[in-house]
Amino acid sequence: MAKVDAIEYGDKKVYSVASFNRGVADWLTRLPTVWVEGEVTELRRNARWQSVFFTLKDPSDGACLGVTILRSRFDALRLDLGDGERVHVLGRPELYEARGDFRFRALSIERFGIGDHLAALERLKRKLADEGLFAAERKRPLPRLPERIGLITGNDAAAKRDVLTTIVARLPAARVLVAETYVQGPLAAPAMIDALRDLCASPGVDVVVLARGGGSFEDLLPFSDERLVRAVAACPIPIVSAVGHEQDTPLCDLAADVRASTPTAAGRLVVPDAVELRERLERARAGLGRGAAATVVRARQRVDHAHERLRRAPALTIERRRARVEQSAARLRALSPRATLERGYAIVRRDDAVVRSVTSVDSGDALEVELSDGRIGARAE
Amino acid sequence: MSTQSFEDAQRELERIVERLERGESELDDAIKLWERGEELYRYCVSKLDSAQGKIEELARRVESSRP
């Protein structure tokens, strides 16, 4: 450690500012070189300055770190950095002695590439999926005729226009409460969370649409911000996410109750078509009339049928009795001797008395023989 | 009735129509169902007619609208 001179005041050792700063600065040089991740903000580069300055900000809680890098080194990296870009910075802490400012002396900067973003998103997606935030059984149905629709969107955004135009065209009576907010950049996620909370607290709002048109991968990153995704999953009101185009799937799409491929599609999802709705009601009403009428007709038919049977009952009784008489007569006829005669037997009479024995006939007696089809005279021998 | 949501009313109306069309209900029930259905129909139509279309901007708190 460098020698730092203190001035003695009695038993107190007092350092000058310069010597204190030098001491701290010297101590800081013992810390190792590390990579730090954050978002670039307040980037200041001036051709007359030896160094380039910017602030590295932690996107999750806004913690800040001042960074300085030699201009020649910065320019050699050819990064063309802009505010809000996520980077990895290699460097070590140092104290700017003249001002006592603590800062990070950068040796190199790497842009947080799409690959890094994708890997981070994939990790977050797996984590939230494991927690069940995207589970199908968490999805709630949307109200068929919403009382009031909450819309979160950027100001003057095409997405806002698309949603509103579609809603009003389908259901002119729709009531929409619009919350304009940031939809890209580092402020977007917290601003959208605020808007979501405010909409949910507004009277009558029973469905929320989160809409943003297409944009670059980085533009849509706030819609995969863990804080926003959790807020969407925890939203007490059914929520439709319509972010970017069909091929974009930010994580808030997975956490929402319904995912719409575009803001226009979201408009179609949240309100029914008033014309169709009326037609459906009219059809139901017509069915109601028909159904009731058919029930009355069926009831009348049952009564008529019963009446008809009642009317025919006496005639039926007589018919049934007549049939029984006929049946008896037929059986009676079957028992008569004629049937026997038809089989070849004959009845022999003498003096109109039936002859039952040869002993009752003398030779020369006149007899009468009855056959099935008539009588003939005969004489005994 | 007044606390019923539009979709509940519409669903009930359509269930009543189905029951009537199946023709399993007694005459007295059928008439009651029909009356209830008409009531539901009028309620749904009035819901559609009475809603006032309106697009409002949410008044945002100052701190959340500042960059």
Image (cartoon, rainbow, N blue to C red):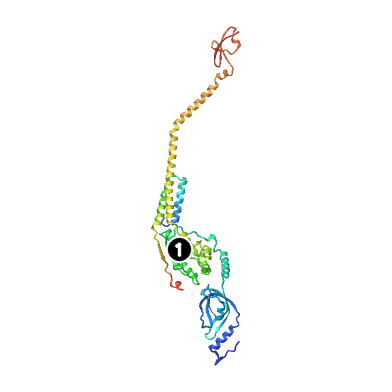
Residue name at image x 50 percent, y 25 percent: A326
The x and y percentages for residue A275 are 42, 55
The x and y percentages for residue B29 are 43, 47
Total labels: the figure holds: 1
Residue name at image x 45 percent, y 63 percent: A162
Q: Report crowding for label 1: few under 14, some 14 to 19, many 20 or more residues within 10 A (C-alpha).
A: some
* Quarter of the figure with residue A6: bottom right
Label 1 belongs to which residue?
A162
The chain carrying label 1 is A
The x and y percentages for residue A264 are 47, 61
Q: In this view, does A7 lie above or below A28?
A: below
* Picture quarter with the N terminus of chain A: bottom right
* Residue A11 appearing in the image: no
* Residue type beneath disc 1: Asp
Q: Residue furthest top?
A: A364
Of residue A315 and residue A83, the one placed in the foreground of this image is: A83
* Picture quarter with the C terminus of chain A: top right
Q: Is residue A333 above or below residue A56?
A: above
* Residue B12 appearing in the image: yes
Of residue B23 and residue A312, the one placed in the foreground of this image is: B23
Residue name at image x 45 percent, y 51 percent: B14
The x and y percentages for residue A65 are 53, 78
Q: Is mark 1 on a helix, strand or loop?
A: helix
Judged left or right of residue A17, residue A274 is: left
